[in-house]
Amino acid sequence: MKLVPKSPTSKGPASNFTGDVWVDAIAAPQGSDQRMSVSRVRFAPGAHTAWHSHALGQTLHITEGVALIGTRDGTTIEAHPGDTIFTPSGEEHWHGATPDDFMEHLAMLDNADDRADTTTWLEHLAPGEYRRPDTT
């Protein structure tokens, strides 16, 4: 057993995020037989990711605020504290805070064999893609 020192909070890069986003690494593989990474990610109101996908999928657990998660087919899910969202391997998606609320989630994923292939970052959202779900 060992105490893993806390990594400093990092700012989400503008190449991958719109708005202010902060990332705290919680867990990373400690040996060659481990793949899981966990981060606490905090989004300012209106902040969100660019389109991206994960080689082995991703689980998001909302801990605070209201989250929006969107997919290429136009589906947008609104999630609240305690909700968990699973995105399958290769599914292109985005996630972030609503325009009115801060949002925090735990992001959990398994690293690909080549860690550089774990997340594929794509383009930023086009106008109209960042939106709340239709409630009609």
Image (tube, rainbow, N blue to C red):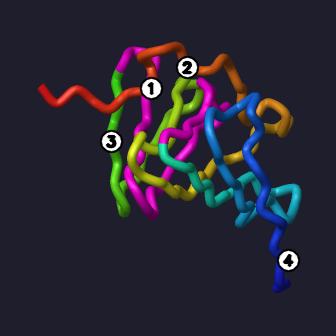
Asked if residue 7 lies in the magenta stretch, the reply is: no
2 or 1: tag closer to the N-terminus: 2
Which stretch appears magenta? 46-74
Amino acid bearing label 2: Leu
Q: Which residue in the structure is indicated by mark 2?
A: 125
**How many angstroms separate mark 3 from mark 4 (CA)?**
34 Å
**How many angstroms separate mark 3 from mark 2 (CA)?**
17 Å
* Viewer-closest of 43 and 36: 43
Q: Are marks 3 and 4 in contact (CB under 8 Å)?
A: no
Q: Which residue in the structure is indicated by mark 3?
A: 78
Residue 15 sits in quarter: top right
3 or 4: tag closer to the N-terminus: 4
Amino acid bearing label 4: Pro
Amino acid bearing label 3: Glu
* Viewer-closest of 21 and 74: 21
2 or 4: tag closer to the N-terminus: 4
Q: Where is residue 98 in the image (x, y as percent from the top left)?
A: 41, 42
On residue 130, which mark appears? 1
Residue furthest out toward the left: 136
Q: Which residue in the structure is indicated by mark 4?
A: 5
Mark 4, other Cα within 10 Å: few <14 / some 14–19 / many ≥20? few
Q: Position of residue 82 (x, y in %)?
A: 36, 62
Q: Which of marks 2 and 4 is in front?
A: 2
Q: Are marks 2 and 1 in contact (CB under 8 Å)?
A: yes
Specify the quadrant that holds the C terminus.
Answer: top left
